[in-house]
Image: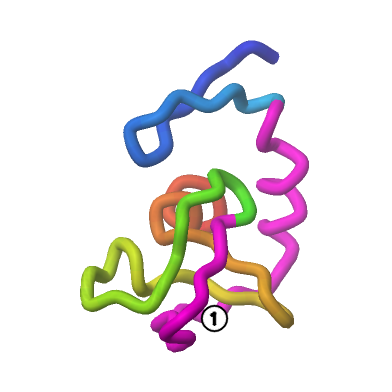
Amino acid sequence: MNEQIEIHGNQWKLKDIIDNVEWSKKQKWQFKKYEEIDDHDHCLICYWTIFHSDDPEEGEAYFYGGSTWLCKECFEKFIK
């Protein structure tokens, strides 16, 4: 499985992210704005930084559980 996929302009090997993709497909995600002003999180799949921002690409994402996030691009590509 050497297939590659582009996420946020970067190339990823599908074999490196497939376990997180498959786990994410089984969860119920809630779209929300990141509210913590002095903190950040990362997308479970591509490690995109998610933080309090007026830019929807950086400040809005999908949330599950205590602190698990997916960026909008990964959600659209793999979960939707």
* Residue situated furthest left in the rendering: 54
Residue 46 location (% of width, % of height)? 54, 44
The residue that appears at 41% across and 60% down in the rendered structure is 72
- Kind of element beneath mark 1: strand
Above/below status of 49 relative to 18: below
Q: Which of 39 and 72 is in front in this view?
A: 39
* Residue situated furthest top in the rendering: 2
Q: Which of 67 and 75 is in front in this view?
A: 67
* Residue situated furthest front in the rendering: 38
Residue 45 location (% of width, % of height)? 60, 47
Please state the total of marks drawn on the protein image: 1
**51 left or right, relative to 27:** left
The residue that appears at 42% across and 85% down in the rendered structure is 37
Residues in magenta? 16-43
| Mark 1 closeness class: few <14, some 14–19, many ≥20 residues within 10 Å | few
Amino acid type assigned to the residue bearing label 1 in the image: Gln
Quadrant into which the N terminus falls: top right
Residue 70 location (% of width, % of height)? 54, 61
Q: Nearer the viewer, residue 78 or 16?
A: 16
Query: What residue does disc 1 label?
Result: 30
State which quadrant residue 9 falls in: top left
The residue that appears at 34% across and 64% down in the rendered structure is 58
The residue that appears at 42% across and 37% down in the rendered structure is 7
Above/below status of 64 relative to 20: below
Residue 63 location (% of width, % of height)? 57, 75
Q: Which of 71 and 42 is in front in this view?
A: 42
Above/below status of 60 relative to 46: below
State which quadrant residue 76 falls in: bottom left
Q: Does the magenta stretch include residue 28?
A: yes
